[in-house]
Image (spheres, rainbow, N blue to C red):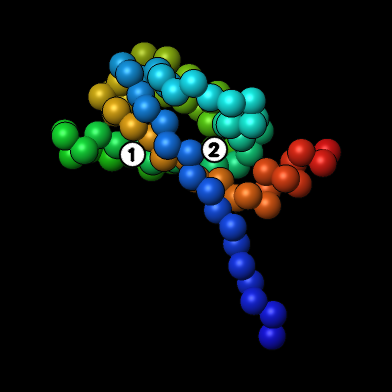
């Protein structure tokens, strides 16, 4: 039997009042705009965490910040891990 191996990568984003403060490369921006991802917002000092999934992180992130009466204040999170499939990224680049 062949091995079923999935390759995942992680982008670590720094957040400042909810906004991404990293200087992202074109490839990193492409990943955040054009790939299905799982993302984990967190603030270790306050011990809070939020996990979500989306097909376009940048759009979903803006939606979170624009919510009029959010259940969660996304500006409280200081970091975010964005997990994506390396294979998905390269397949999307082909089309």
Mark 2 surroundings within 10 Å by alpha-carbon count, few (fewer than 14), some (14 through 19), many (20 or more) = some
Label 1, secondary structure: give it.
Answer: strand
Against 31, residue 68 (above or below) is above
Which residue was labeled with disc 1? 50
Q: Which residue is mark 2?
A: 54
Residue 9 appears in the figure: yes
Q: Position of residue 61 (x, y in %)?
A: 47, 25
Q: Is residue 90 left or right of residue 61?
A: right
In the displayed structure, 65 sits above or below 43; it is: above
The quarter of the picture where the N terminus appears is bottom right
Q: Residue at x 29, y 28 (%)?
A: 78
**Based on the displayed image, in which of its 4 quarters is residue 89 positioned?**
top right
Q: Position of residue 73 (x, y in %)?
A: 28, 23
Q: Say above or below: 88 vs 6.
A: above
- Residue at point 48%, 39% (across, down): 11
Q: Position of residue 3 (x, y in %)?
A: 64, 76
């Amino acid at each position: 039997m062949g091995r079923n191996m999935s390759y995942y990568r992680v982008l670590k984003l720094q957040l400042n009042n909810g906004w991404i403060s990293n200087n992202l490369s074109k490839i990193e921006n492409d990943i955040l705009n054009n790939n299905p991802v799982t993302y984990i917002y967190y603030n270790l000092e306050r011990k809070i965490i939020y996990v979500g999934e989306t097909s376009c992180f940048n759009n979903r992130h803006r939606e979170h910040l624009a919510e009029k009466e959010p259940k969660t204040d996304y500006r409280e999170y200081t970091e975010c891990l964005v997990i994506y499939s390396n294979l998905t990224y390269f397949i999307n680049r082909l089309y």
